[in-house]
Image (cartoon, rainbow, N blue to C red):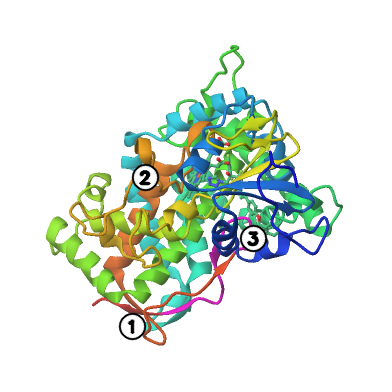
Amino acid sequence: KNPNEPPLVFSWFPVVGSTITYGMDPPRFFRENRAKYGDIFTFILLGKKTTVYVGCAGNDFILNGKAKDVCAEEIYTVLTTPVFGKDVVYDCPNSKLMEQKKFMKIALTTQAFQSYVPIIADEVSSYFKKSADFKGKSGIVNMPPKMAQITIFTASHSLQGKEIRHKFDETLADLYHDLDMGFNPVNFMLHWAPLPWNNRRDHAQRTIAKIYMDTIKERRAAGKSDAQDMMWHLMNSTYKNGTPVPDHEIAHMMIALLMAGQHSSSSTSSWIMLWLAARPDIMEELYREQVEVLGADLPPLQYEDLAKLPLNQAIIKETLRLHAPIHSIMRAVKQPMPVPGTKYVIPPSHVLLSAGGVTATDPAFFPEPDTWEPHRWDKDSPIAPGWCKGAASPYLPFGAGRHRCIGEQFANVQLQTITAMVVREFKFRNVDGSNKVIGTDYASLFSRPLEPANIHWEKRD
Ligand code: HEM
Ligand SMILES: N#Cc1ccc(COc2ccc(/C=C/c3ccc(C(F)(F)[C@](O)(Cn4cnnn4)c4ccc(F)cc4F)nc3)cc2)cc1
């Protein structure tokens, strides 16, 4: 036992170590070992010594780690590069990723969001009008697959552009599914294996990239585009060294953004719908909030309306507090890292794992942490969230530091618009009338509800 290293979680098995216990229920694994060993401990994940450092200090140590000490691409590239494509995100130096994130952010402006809200609202309304599962006055439906559809239609039409949206009605949907099969944690280890799903993944990646590159050529030939979308901005971006972004990198960044947005938003919107069914009182309060603020005739939703609906906004905040799609953020250690305030030095052979959900469900910051209560975010709430020392936030569903999410604003616009539109059309409740929600599936890359997750819906007259 090395006194300069954090305590090692006991396990009966070499290599496999605690992989299964962790992989089955990460929050439980973090809670139980934090109680035993404190905020910093090491466990064996797929043969790698993985040091978990939770709490305010742990979040800061890992997420604000310097590029010379911690490395994201070393861990993630095996998983993301076969899916996104080469030369982007984790298949290039971090300095290049930072430029790519700057390009992506340029497209995510208030003006763009103003054009996105009506697009998203219309996609939601027409989905429910067309869907066979929502015919008649009321019924029971397994919600997550419906939210996956709504998410891909709303994100592709707004962020990706009209051409891509319409291709989802044809070939793109199946290709996306094949690509998605390759986006799973087993590929952290078996990305190289010529498994059937990895071959389908590679074929899908090449075919989808070609669809994007053909669209880029069409748009370039057509000249000026009125579109506010991501593709147009990337087509007009140039790296610091003067190189315009190559078409294959634009295509691969578009795939990365599609995958990011799809998994995070479809998981989050599913949880939102399940909680609205568990709390019909909140769903009624949301409806009243819109009627009071926007008028009983409920005019078409605009971007400016979203900021006038605080409870609608709090729904997304509270859902992400309990159901952050990314439960584990990983970094490779590049040089020995002394842990301030302890005698520990984390060696380069370790992987660091940051679990933001631990502070987000810590009673010290969130009274009654396991209760889904959107009103805790009210200005004068008696159970208002607390803060870390030094004003750092205990609530980090979008990460922090140099790898911080650039999609937070888009995700909020998308999720708030979807929520507001669903509240206008339906009343939900649980099939058994309970105020519970189903458990979490941690087996995929993004935590999401176990299925089937059935709810009862009824159309408002
Ligand atoms: C509810 C929705 C979302 C959540 C909870 C979320 C969460 C996160 C988190 C935790 C990180 C940090 C990852 C790390 O430090 O390793 C991150 C990074 C990122 N996200 Fe998101 N995300 C969401 C939506 C989106 C969307 C819609 C996009 C694109 C339009 C996006 C694009 C990105 C990008 C480009 C990064 C940077 C990765 C890096 O710098 O290494 N995300 N996101
Ligand atoms: N046996 C077994 C066994 C073992 C272990 C387990 C469970 O163990 C783990 C461990 C870690 C993880 C990590 C999640 C993880 C990390 C990175 C990414 C990402 F990079 F992909 C992303 O951040 C995603 N993203 C960002 N914003 N929105 N989405 C991203 C960035 C930029 C980008 F442009 C596009 C992107 F989409 N995605 C997900 C998940 C599960 C189960 C079973």
**Magenta highlight range:** 442-455
Question: Residue 221: x, y in percent?
Answer: 56, 27
Q: Is residue 310 left or right of residue 156?
A: left
Q: Earlier in the sequence, mark 3 or mark 2?
A: 2
Q: Is residue 175 left or right of residue 216?
A: right
Residue nearest the viewer, comparing 324 with 106:
324
Question: Residue 432: x, y in percent?
Answer: 41, 87
Count of marks placed on residues: 3
Look at mark 1 in the image and give the residue it sits on.
Answer: 137
Residue nearest the viewer, comparing 350 with 118:
350
Image quarter where the C terminus lies is bottom left
Question: Residue 198: x, y in percent?
Answer: 79, 53
Q: Amino acid at mark 1?
A: Lys
Q: Is residue 382 left or right of residue 67?
A: left
Q: For residue 444, which numbered disc appears in the image?
A: 3
Question: Residue 245: x, y in percent?
Answer: 60, 23
Ligand 2 within 8 Å of disc 3? The answer is: yes
Q: Residue furthest top?
A: 242
Q: Amino acid at mark 2?
A: Tyr
Look at mark 2 in the image and give the residue it sits on.
Answer: 116
Residue 453 falls within the magenta-colored stretch: yes
Q: Amino acid at mark 3?
A: Ser
Q: Measure how far apart labels 1 and 3 are at the Cα level.
A: 35 Å
